[in-house]
Amino acid sequence: MTLKKKGLSKLIKSLQKSTVTPEKADKIMYKLAKKGEEELIQAYSTPNIDLNKSTGSFEVTTPNIQHDVQNQDGVVELWAEGEELLFYEFGTGITHNSPRDWENVLNIQVPEYVSAIGTYGKGYGAYPYWHYRNDNMQSIMTRGIVARGGFARAINRAVSDVEVTVKEVLK
């Protein structure tokens, strides 16, 4: 997907000429943030499946990630939090994430504090699979976590839906 700067500039100029009230602008931003939240919901609802070597069964884990859209004092914010957020957003292990596929139309880069694929912790993610122990001290074989890119998808969705959302709110 590409961002058409000419079309976006045209939209901005038409908005400047219109009589957009602060309330309408807030509504536009809130609707775009809610569309972004839909992308987070979809991205983070897919479970990760690992093999429990101790029992021979599969370990299915769904990330414990909370998210919401807040609108306070004219600031609309889409947020997410959880211990596993960065693992599910950017991925772990080379099997699923080499090279790291995290892109968005605004070209916002992966934050510097996010480890390169395969280097987090003891660096086991540099191997096609590795083992860890769960809370019951059972051996779990994993190939890592596929990057879900929820925020990258939210950015892309918000940008692609700007024109439609503005027209919807201003009609």
Image: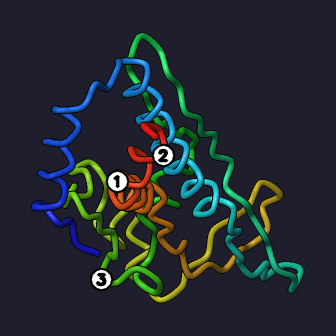
Q: Nearer the viewer, residue 91 or 55?
A: 91
The amino acid marked with disc number 1 is Glu
Q: Mark 3 touching mark 2, by CB under 8 A?
A: no
The label on residue 168 is 2
Left or right of 119? Residue 29 is: right
Relative to 146, residue 112 above or below = above
- In front: mark 3 or mark 2? 2
**Relative image position of residue 148 (x, y in whole percent):** 51, 67
**Residue drawn at (71%, 68%) of the image:** 47
Q: Nearer the viewer, residue 95 or 15?
A: 15
Q: Residues within 10 Å of mark 3 (few under 14, many from 20)?
A: few
The label on residue 163 is 1
In the rendered image, the residue lying farthest to the top is 73
The amino acid marked with disc number 3 is Pro
The amino acid marked with disc number 2 is Glu
- In front: mark 3 or mark 1? 1
Q: Which residue is mark 3?
A: 99
